[in-house]
Image (cartoon, helix red, strand yellow):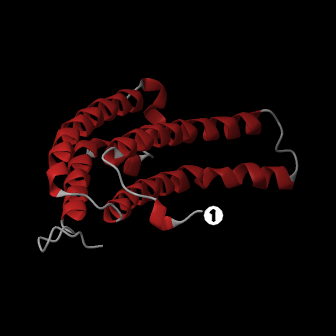
């Protein structure tokens, strides 16, 4: 049985966040490109000969907007999960040094992955999708700032629970 109390935050939560956001964001961006291409292929192949199939193919038209908003909310959910797991950690303030050492690593990783997404998104093949993926683009344009704020807030949440009376930790 899964117990929420057993899930604890970790130093690597922001690294995992950056990597998961990149993989999910790139996957959804490519999916936003592929699905309309498939729908156009189905239209030109003559598979929309009946009213039902025509309606099914036309229902795909709002897919990119849904994926754009859905992906953005998944990113927000990943950020919230960092803060929740940070609240579940009990740590001594001496480990703040480790958090401070992990912060540049996650920021450097977010710089590289943000640039990799930008290179992919500005590829001429994806030019038609770039303007439709405005929330995903916004997230990756500010990925370094988001990672920095997530690191700082996570550190504040983890270390603000420590009590100076007798060295006991509050929860």
Residue that sits furthest to the front in the current view: 166
Q: Nearer the viewer, residue 144 or 129?
A: 144
Residue that sits furthest to the right in the current view: 50
Q: Residue at x 42, y 54 (%)?
A: 72
Q: Position of residue 139 (x, y in %)?
A: 33, 48
Q: How many marks?
A: 1
Q: Would residue 145 be seen by someone viewing this image from the given angle?
A: yes
Instruction: Count neighbours of disc 1 (C-alpha within 10 A) and say few if under 14, some if 14 to 19, many if 20 or more.
Output: few
Please indicate whether residue 23 sits to the left or right of residue 58 in the image: left
Q: Position of residue 143 (x, y in %)?
A: 28, 44
Q: Would residue 137 be seen by someone viewing this image from the given angle?
A: no
Q: Quadrant of residue 111?
A: top left
**The N terminus lies in which quarter of the figure?**
bottom right
Q: Nearer the viewer, residue 11 or 31?
A: 11
Q: Residue at x 87, y 45 (%)?
A: 49
Q: Nearer the viewer, residue 27 or 156?
A: 156
Please indicate whether residue 40 sits to the left or right of residue 120 in the image: right
Q: Position of residue 70 (x, y in %)?
A: 50, 56
Q: Position of residue 61 (x, y in %)?
A: 62, 51
Q: Is residue 54 above or below residue 117?
A: below
* Callout 1: SS: loop
Q: Residue at x 74, y 48 (%)?
A: 57
Please indicate whether residue 49 sits to the left or right of residue 4 in the image: right
* Residue behind mark 1: 1
Q: Quadrant of residue 51?
A: bottom right
Residue that sits furthest to the left in the current view: 164
**The C terminus lies in which quarter of the figure?**
bottom left
Please indicate whether residue 104 sits to the left or right of residue 116 in the image: left
């Amino acid at each position: 049985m899964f117990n929420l109390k057993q899930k604890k935050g970790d130093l690597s939560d922001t690294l995992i966040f950056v990597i998961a956001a990149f993989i999910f964001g790139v996957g959804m961006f490519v999916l936003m490109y592929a699905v309309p291409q498939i729908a156009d292929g189905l239209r030109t192949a003559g598979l929309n000969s009946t009213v039902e199939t025509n309606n099914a193919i036309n229902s795909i038209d709002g897919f990119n907007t849904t994926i754009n908003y859905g992906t953005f909310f998944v990113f927000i959910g990943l950020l919230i999960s960092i803060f929740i797991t940070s609240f579940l950690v009990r740590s001594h303030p001496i480990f703040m040094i480790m958090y401070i050492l992990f912060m540049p690593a996650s920021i450097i990783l977010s710089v590289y992955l943000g640039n990799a997404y930008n290179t992919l998104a500005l590829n001429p093949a994806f030019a038609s999708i770039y303007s439709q993926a405005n929330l995903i683009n916004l997230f990756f344009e500010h990925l370094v700032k988001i990672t920095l704020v997530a690191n700082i807030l996570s550190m504040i949440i983890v270390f603000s629970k420590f009590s100076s009376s007798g060295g006991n930790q509050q929860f």
